[in-house]
Amino acid sequence: MSEQSRNPLRFLTTGGVQTQFHRLQDAAASSHLLERAQETLNPTNLMDVAHQTPGHILDMITGEDQEDDTEDIERFNYKQELQRKLTVTSIIGLGFSLMGVPFGMSTTLYIGLIDGGSVTLLWGWVVVAILSLCTALSLAEICSKYPSSGGIYHQAAILASEKYSLICSWFTGWFLIIGNWSMFTSIVYGGAQFILSIFGLKDSGYRQDSFLVLLLFFIMVLLSGLVNLKFANRLDTINNLCVIWTIGTVLIIDIILLIKARSRNDINFVLSNFDASRSGWPPVIAFFVGLQPAAFTLQGFGMIPAMTDEVKKPEKNIPKGMVLAVLVAGITGVIFIIPILTILPELNLLLDKNPDIMPIDLVFKLATESYLISFLLVLLLVGAVCFAGIGSLTTSSRATYAFARDNALPCNWIWVQVKIIDETTVPANALFLSMGVACFLGVLSLFSTSAFSAFMGSAVISLSIANGIPILSSVLGKRKKVKGTAFKLKRIGYVLNIISLFWIVLTVVILCMPVQIPITIISMNYAFVVFLSFTVFAAVSWIFYGKDHFQGPQLDHHHSAEQNIQMHSLSNDNTKDLDDFSEHKDETIYEASNIDSNEGSTSFAMSTSKVSSPNSSFPDEADLDVLQDEDDGNPENSILGWDLLDDVRPTKLNRVFKGGSG
């Protein structure tokens, strides 16, 4: 018998194997096992760790190994090509720019005014902010467990059942990619329209020229691409600057409007005025339709996980940044909306005039009675548009890069190429592809402005459904596969997940409804038609390409040599401890059979018999089968399994102890 089999504790702490304590915490879920694990790693009890430095031992105990950044990618068996430079504050800034509160609410203000007015705009925003926060928390927990630039489409594959994991990953990935591309297109095209509406401040008869809008759209796409390409090493600074600019814009606009406005509405109007007569909908339905502006705005957080490859300690900073971005955006929205409602003029002055002039422009003009001040306030919002466009293209390019890396896009070898610019690696070709798709979608505006307007709705629908698939998969799997995450929702996890799924379904319904009735060809909401077109495209591409080429997330089964550990128990007396620990109902350890160190990654391609799924669900309570390696059946070459290795999913798992569902 080998030394490894005779003394698993000694093997755990010697031979160069330095297991981080937080992975051991995942495997030993109960406090009893944690105490035993602490004794195991205690250098006073094990002289074999004397060669370790005190700092490394502390890292083993706290799980705060600062040099372990690349392992988050290696667990998925991808080469780390992009540098980890972004911090949690940068992620907050990126999420903040993607949501672009002042710009998002300004360009969609007319919807809230038509479908309820003050109550819909203010309290609808609060409701959507709370529901979006629930969704962000649900995604944050999953992203913390499975940090990958593939984000939610990787997580969908892992969390779904083995039978559906690959196809779930495919559709989630396409909804994510399409949502990213459409969102970037919508932000930049809406920004072009917003900029040109400035001319309406001087000329009340102004009419927008479609070709001029398209030209400005192309210019903004190129500028966003230039910043992402040439200033990639400054993305952290750009994201932080976005927070300052956006909050500053909100405060400046609020203060100037409150100072300059000659008349103000009372508090009752701001908090309780509801008028949906212009919508034609019954009051309740009008209120829900009026949630569209908030739903459009508070959506970008689902695009953040695409930045995982470039974030320091992504298992912690991605979830924190995602949740805090939604929280800050929600508060900022309230601060922005209340002063607007306080000085809001008569609706007929905003809605019955020139449709090519955005209501927010007229609000500025009527409140300040100054063209110059109105122009400057609009310029502040233009800055927010620019930040939103840059951030949206950033996430779109990273999501495209990750999707191509899994062979989901034709000619994937082109889109995965990176370039080094100013000592910073950039997925340049994925960036160019995202820009090209946006320009193509922009050209469609020349044929039908109504259909093109549906891209914004379809973008949010696509992103919402993409967010919902991993959450639904986690709930159906009884949340077992998010056990041990660094960002824990604990007992409220189920509640938040269910609320998130409810909101996602409601979002899809809301975004498919027209703002007003009766419906005409022009006023018809084509968002669902566009989304169905995207879905059909994803289905057809799956049949003719995806099922034969798509690999899914590439998981690393051995993670690294330091984690090839045999550990049948947590004491020197294996048999005694097995009997002792089996008495603890809530303690679960999964043991994987021998994994060939030369076969580090596993594809999700179910069609190939030699490829196994790392996505297999946890064994049932009664399943105590001991699975041995199909090559040599040697239990000595086993590896402590599922939770200890986080994202590492071995081919075969052996239930050693009974446990709860987690």
Image: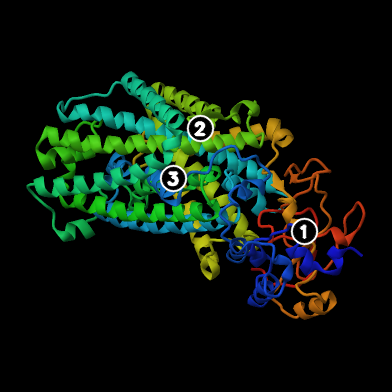
The residue to which callout 1 is attached is: 15
Residue 584 drawn at (x, y percent): 72, 79
Residue 92 shown left or right of residue 625 in the figure: left
- The residue lying toward the viewer, choosing from 405 and 205, is 405
Name the residue type under label 3.
Gly
Q: Which mark is residue 300?
A: 3
Q: Is residue 352 visible?
A: no
Q: Is residue 371 visible?
A: yes
Residue at image location 69% in from the left, 57% down from the top: 645
Neighbour tally class for label 2: few under 14, some 14-19, many 20 plus, Cα within 10 Å: few
Q: Secondary structure at mark 3?
A: helix
Q: What count of labels does the image hold?
A: 3
- The residue lying toward the viewer, choosing from 146 and 550, is 146
Neighbour tally class for label 3: few under 14, some 14-19, many 20 plus, Cα within 10 Å: many
Cβ atoms at labels 2 and 1 below 8 Å apart:
no
Locate the N terminus and report the quarter of the image it occupies.
bottom right
